[in-house]
Image (cartoon, helix red, strand yellow):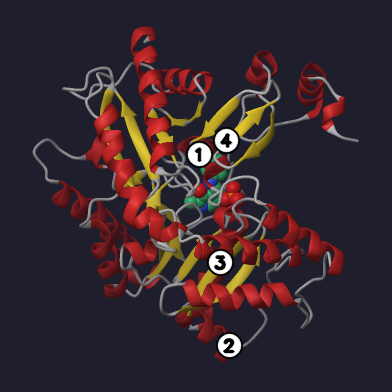
Amino acid sequence: MTYQNFSLERLQEMDAAHHLHPFTDHKDLRAAGTRIITRADGPFVYDAEGREILDGMAGLWCVNVGYGRNELAEAAYAQMKELPYYNSFFRCTTPTPALLAEKLAQIAPDGVSQVFYGSSGSEANDTALRLVRHYWALEGKPHKRKVISRNWAYHGSTIAGASLGGMAAMHGQLNGAVPDIVHVMPPYAFELRHDGESDEAFGLRAAKAVEDAILDAGAENVAAFIGEPVMGAGGVKIAPDSYWPEIQRICRKYDVLLMLDEVITGYGRTGQWFAAQTFGLEPDTITTAKALTSGYQPLSALLVGDRISSTLVEKGGEFFHGYTYSGHPVACAVALANLDIIEREGLIERVRDETGPYLAKALKEAIGDHDIVGEVRSIGLMAAIEIVKDNSTRERYPNVGVAGATVRDHAIANGMMLRAVGDTMILSPPLIWTKETIDMACERIRYALDRSAIDL
Ligand code: PXG
């Protein structure tokens, strides 16, 4: 049975009747109907009406090698025929998770050489939280349990993920978060920098908030700090240069583990394999998922630093944690083929040397001075555009979210898939974008902004 046998209306009818979508107001969705994406190729996706849309979001921050990679389909097919599934419990495993683990150890930052698999970023963060607390218990410091996180952080949607994250709306529906997680201010200069404060001073102030939280809790009670090197779903918030070195210093000073959530930044997005390398950080855990398979299969890898793994091995005792699909052989086969493409095609070097700098320049030139743009910022191939009512004062439009949705809708209608986080527009395209693709995107974004400025 293929979907081609069904009309768009029939598909929408089935969807409306039975499908509860993620992060959705279901009343709204029933009223508005669903856009159904049916196929994709290279940097483009196509909806059921055949409209071509340039995908500025790489799916959901994940399709780094672009669409239509037969090689990945073939890797999955071959593995499914050979061995579709076997588990990694009870002293077993299969070949591809072992091959992938060695590959990940090669590309990970120094001092990070072990991997724990799951199927999603949320699962990997659940693993990370349990693992750091287990580590401190093994070290004889079970009271070191607290984790410092940040407002606006996104660490997933399981109960642990949502508790680690700093999304107020999600906390509102948690009905009991995982205890001992504390949230501090994010390094979001655009909204939080004081008048006259330099970026550098702001970055140090935001890092100081982490230090204050550690001191408040008592360093002897703090297990770890967790952060996305660049906050993604919170609105591509890029910290000032002073922030991360200070966070690293603070973590070392108080013997607090550094947990990086690289679910979005991992596998090339910032112009290195990992943002830890871009920022020169020495993390104890790195959460990765999404672009590990470019979204062709669900797979996450929690990369674990040697400090934690050597304690696990030396002290022994079972770590009571794992998933049916930890080390899924098909997902791992696809990941291996995906990493091979990234390497073979030099996609990371291209982001670092060519398309990353070009995107920054092209966006500034095309829309930096637009009447409703308050700031454009980017790192590698991830960017944010702040929508404001007045670009001289950076005053926002009333009712946060309306302006963002307006720009997004004009962009999509004009063949450009963008995501809005409140009134911040997000761009996180496949790493296969060329300078020409970037020019096309800038043109379409400029048009969407022009139309939105008239409407708003
Ligand atoms: N950490 C980070 C940094 C993420 O971006 C997760 C963890 C959770 O991964 P899973 O695979 O469990 O979804 C994510 C996921 C958005 C959006 O609206 C972003 C994500 C997921 C859904 C929506 O931008 N990121």
Query: Is residue 186 visible to the viewer in this orientation of the structure?
Result: no
* Label 1 crowd (10 A; few <14 / some 14-19 / many >=20): many
The span from disc 4 to disc 2 (Cα, nearest Å) is: 46 Å
The amino acid type, in three-letter code, at marker 1 is Met
**Could you say where residue 403 lies in the image, as x and y percent from the top left?**
39, 19
State yes or no: discs 3 and 2 in contact (Cβ < 8 Å). Answer: no
What residue does disc 1 label? 57
The amino acid type, in three-letter code, at marker 3 is Leu
Q: Residue at x 32, y 30 (%)?
A: 386
The amino acid type, in three-letter code, at marker 2 is Val
Q: Is mark 1 within 8 Å of ligand 1?
A: yes
- Give the answer, above or below, for where 241 lies relative to 35: below
The span from disc 3 to disc 1 (Cα, nearest Å) is: 23 Å
What residue does disc 3 label? 302
Disc sitting over residue 44 in the figure: 4
- Give the answer, above or below, for where 368 lies relative to 83: above
What residue does disc 2 label? 313
Q: Residue at x 39, y 60 (%)?
A: 349
The one nearer the camera, 450 or 42, is: 42
Q: Nearer the viewer, mark 3 or mark 4?
A: 4
**Could you say where residue 410 lies in the image, as x and y percent from the top left?**
47, 18
* Label 2 crowd (10 A; few <14 / some 14-19 / many >=20): few
Q: Secondary structure at mark 4?
A: strand
State yes or no: discs 3 and 4 in contact (Cβ < 8 Å). Answer: no
State yes or no: discs 4 and 2 in contact (Cβ < 8 Å). Answer: no
Q: Quadrant of residue 421?
A: top left
Q: Nearer the viewer, mark 1 or mark 4?
A: 4
Looking at the image, is mark 3 or mark 2 earlier in the sequence? 3
Q: Secondary structure at mark 3?
A: strand
